[in-house]
Amino acid sequence: MWQGIEGHDEVVDRFRKTLRHGRLASTYLFVGPAGIGKRTFALRLAQSLLCGQVPDEQLTYCGECESCRLAAAGTHPDLLVAQLPEGKSTLPIELFIGDRDHRHQTGLCHHFSLKPFLGNRRIAVIDDVDHFSQESANCLLKTLEEPPPDSLLILIGTSPSRQLLTIRSRAQLVHFSPLSQETFLRLAIANGIVEDLAAAQRLAGISNGSLERARQLAAPELWEFRGILSRYLDQPEIDAVGTAELVSDFVDKAGKEASARRARLKTVLQFAADFYREKMRNDHRVETIGQLDHCLKAAEYIDRNANQATLIQWWASQLGLRRSTPAHPAGTLDPSC
């Protein structure tokens, strides 16, 4: 276990080897399931590299110098952190180049280009890079192509396939594996997500090694809905209208915030995808594969700001049609419109 982070010793070894040989890249892209410690790892790495007392190659920090104290408090002038703002579906350009009245005078790209204040490098950590738009990614392009001297940029996402080519091609990829079942069970209990081993084991099967997903799924109402949805999907003929109404009502109960409803709809679609994955273990019919594809395609549309009601109706209708591919035939409703 490195700096209190479990499950990623191989990544630690890779960075130690890189630092020993003096080959630290200017940009890294961390990918892996959400909720497994990528952001925490990035911040601990940054604190280690900014520490004024411990050599870089040791990949640790003293915790006592001014740099360590500022980093721990989240106020280090040479450590910049950006993430998806609450209620937003894409990273706004203002995060990188400032608002219209202060273009290129503020924002992460401007601050990142300045000389270090305390030490010998500046570090920026950008979370949620799955949510780059083409416009916001272009704001970062010059920084990626011409990084400032003595700088390190860490991007955090879930999958290389979800990254724009302009981002993916200019960063070194670092894969983070899901937490092992043993680690997941221990941390789920230690972090208060569940109270006992039996509950942790129940979550382990559908959380894919992600504590974030486990925390979302631990709520009793989600488990109850999961069972109801499974019964709807397990019918010989799916009631598309009834399924859409069921899901719409449940998603609306997440609250008035659009981000909360989007998150719940993603969870519902993951429930459905899990149902079809389980079904495929004993049923390899083309229609089952197609239904799984529709669940995954619908989840993609959420991040494109598709209309929620339209998306749910489209998804439910596609399950009812039992098509084998996620393509949209003539006359089929496309939720991205």
Image (cartoon, grey):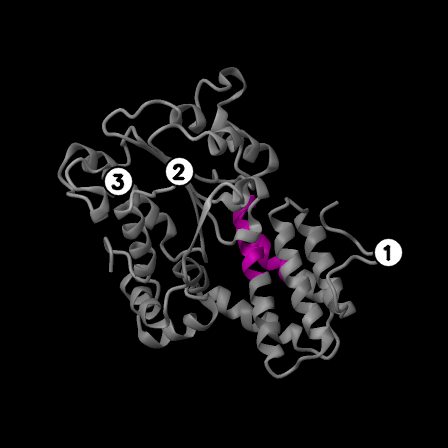
Residue topped by disc 3: 49
Query: Magenta stretch: residue 256 in it?
Result: yes
Image position, residue 45 (x, y; %): 29, 45
Q: Nearer the viewer, mark 1 or mark 3?
A: 3
Residue topped by disc 1: 330
Image position, residue 56 (x, y; %): 23, 42
Q: Residue at x 65, y 51 (%)?
A: 301
Three-letter amino acid code of the residue under disc 1: Ala
Instruction: Examine the rendered structure and indicate whether residue 78 appears above or below residue 176.
Output: above
Q: Check the picture and name the quadrant holding the C terminus.
A: top right
Image position, residue 111 (x, y; %): 39, 25
Q: Secondary structure at mark 1?
A: loop
Dividing the picture into quadrants, the one containing residue 165 is top right
Going from N to C along the chain, the mark reached first, 1 or 3, is 3
Q: Secondary structure at mark 2?
A: loop
Magenta segment boundaries in residue numbering: 246-268
Q: Residue at x 27, y 32 (%)?
A: 75
Q: Is residue 272 left or right of residue 87?
A: right
Q: Check the picture and name the quadrant holding the N terminus.
A: bottom left
Q: Residue at x 66, y 50 (%)?
A: 308
Q: Nearer the viewer, mark 3 or mark 2?
A: 2
Residue topped by disc 2: 26
Three-letter amino acid code of the residue under disc 3: Leu
Q: Residues within 10 Å of mark 2 (few under 14, many from 20)?
A: many
Dividing the picture into quadrants, the one containing residue 113 is top left
